[in-house]
Image (tube, helix red, strand yellow):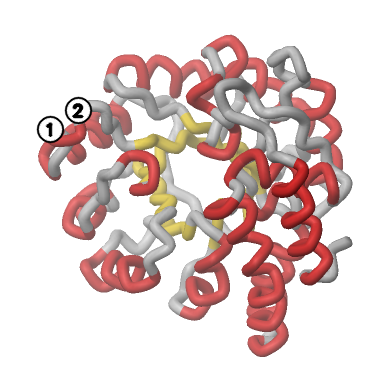
Amino acid sequence: MPKFPIKGVMPPMITPFKENGDVDFEAIQFNLEKWNKTGLTGFLVAGSNSETPYLDETEKLKLIELTVQTVDREKFVLVGTGLESTRATIELTNKAARLGAKAALLLTPNYYGDAMGDEAQLQYFSDVADHSDIPVMIYNVTKFTHINISPAVVSKLSTHPNILGMKDSSGNIAQLVKFQVTGLDPEFNLLVGTASAWNPALQIGIKASIMALANCCPQGCVDVQTLYDEGKQLESLELYKRLYPVNEAVTANFGVPGLKYACDRLGFKGGFTRKPLLNNSDDQRRKIDEILHAAELI
């Protein structure tokens, strides 16, 4: 199927849970309806910030269905379907396709990390792409997989007709440049996966991002790009710098629990985490409040 360009900001959607650990689907619908009114270009269901390792397949499929049914038709619905085996990944990807997902994001298999070298990566992504009913994207997130996809591998995969692009969450601008200069198919979409690299990524020609910060600060993340595209580079940079400490808080410092608390504070429904992930302590929440206040968000 033909590739298509991706531009704009997408959140890797949080999954609010009730105190008893059940998925709070009403809270998710509330968030979707509110996000839908912003300038977000789409949504990632079952990403890293969705607490995906704690979701079973039934929950994932219901989240996909709810998202597709709730958001505007022109919004891009991407689904994290990468599992450890090629066979299971293909099966989940095609179930997501039947529910209306437009593309799938594939986490690099990593349990047998020492065996997941260039050859295994090429085979995995190619096999899934060959048998997927929707386009697939590569997900390079070294923080969780401890595997970094090489520019040489990405260059080869970029020519596959059903591999749409890659989300690189390393936060390494130098590596993004290296991906570009190694030689990518002109229709391959290279996305940045963290708000900490958003403005620098725009400066090297990146057009789209999937970032945790977009859950709680969707319009701010969108505005960084809008200002840049309007030629207001200094204003874009200043907004990016103001949001940077917030992103650091909800990713590196306090993680998903911090992101969910920030969502609660900024008008969305973060809900509880699913055990064994712990919710933030009172002291952690106070620190997040201070950061949000300094960023003029509360």
Report if the CB atoms under discs 2 and 1 are less than 8 Å apart.
yes
Would residue 272 appear left or right of 91 to someone viewing this image? right
- 68, 235: nearer the viewer: 235
- State the quadrant of the N terminus: top left
Question: Which amino acid type is shown beneath numbered disc 1?
Answer: Ala
Query: Dot 2, how many residues are within 10 Å of its Cα: few (below 14), some (14-19), or many (20+)?
Result: few
Question: Residue drawn 43% across and 25% down?
Answer: 133
Would residue 228 appear left or right of 270 to someone viewing this image? left
**Residue 196 percent location from the top left of the image:** 54, 66
* Numbered badge on residue 208: none
Circle 1 SS class: helix
* Numbered badge on residue 112: 2
Residue 68 vertical position relative to residue 261 in the rendered view, above or below: above
Question: Residue drawn 29% across and 52% down?
Answer: 158
To which quarter of the image does residue 179 belong?
bottom left
Question: Residue drawn 29% across and 16% down?
Answer: 87
Does residue 8 appear anywhere in the picture? no
Question: Which amino acid type is shown beneath numbered disc 2?
Answer: Tyr
**Residue 116 percent location from the top left of the image:** 17, 36
- 15, 36: nearer the viewer: 15
Alpha carbon separation for disc pair 2 and 1: 6 Å
Query: Dot 1, how many residues are within 10 Å of its Cα: few (below 14), some (14-19), or many (20+)?
Result: few
**Residue 68 percent location from the top left of the image:** 69, 29
Question: Residue drawn 43% across and 54% down?
Answer: 169
Residue 89 vertical position relative to residue 284 in the rendered view, above or below: above
**Residue 189 percent location from the top left of the image:** 43, 56
Does residue 132 appear anywhere in the picture? yes
Pointer 1 residue: 115
